[in-house]
Amino acid sequence: MLIVMMLVEILHTVRISIRSHVLAMTEPFLVVGLIAAIRRILVITLEAAALGKEAWTSESASGILHSSMVEFALLGLLVLILVLCIALLRRYAPAAQQLEEV
């Protein structure tokens, strides 16, 4: 049921965007992406903390830490990009009244 509701919401957004020739109602999707990225950052932090309790002498622990830090950096960049997109969208979004006229 949740998947069906998500698909209906996406199709509704696409339909409005096609009719108005303006990318409308994208903010909820950006916020969901932002929440998912922040959640993954928290998971990586917890995994690194748990790994820190083990011995750092093994090669596998070192490799896991390196890949975790690369993923952490990329997710941090993604969070910054999503926040910038949300800020720009709120600043330059067309008024809701203009979208209703179309």
Image (cartoon, grey):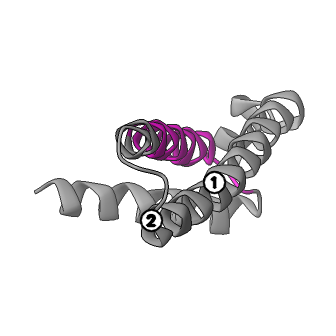
Q: Bounds of the magenta span?
A: 23-46
Residue occupying the point 49% across, 64% down: 64
Residue 98 drawn in magenta: no
The answer to whether 9 is drawn above or below residue 80 in the figure is below
- Image quarter of residue 16: bottom right
Q: Between residues 2 and 19, which one lies in front from this camera angle?
A: 2
- Mark 1 and mark 2 in contact? Answer it, CB < 8 Å: no
Badge 1: few (under 14), some or many (20 or more) residues near its Cα, within 10 Å?
some
Instruction: Identify the residue position indicated by label 1 in the image.
Output: 69
Quarter that holds the N terminus: bottom left
- x 44%, y 65%: residue: 58
Which residue is under mark 2? 58
What percent of the width, then of the height, locates residue 40? 46, 46
**Is 33 inside the magenta-drawn segment?**
yes
Name the N-terminal-most of marks 1 and 2: 2
Q: Is residue 57 left or right of residue 25?
A: left
Q: Amino acid at mark 1?
A: Met
Q: Quadrant of residue 5?
A: bottom left
Q: CA distance from mark 1 to mark 2?
A: 17 Å
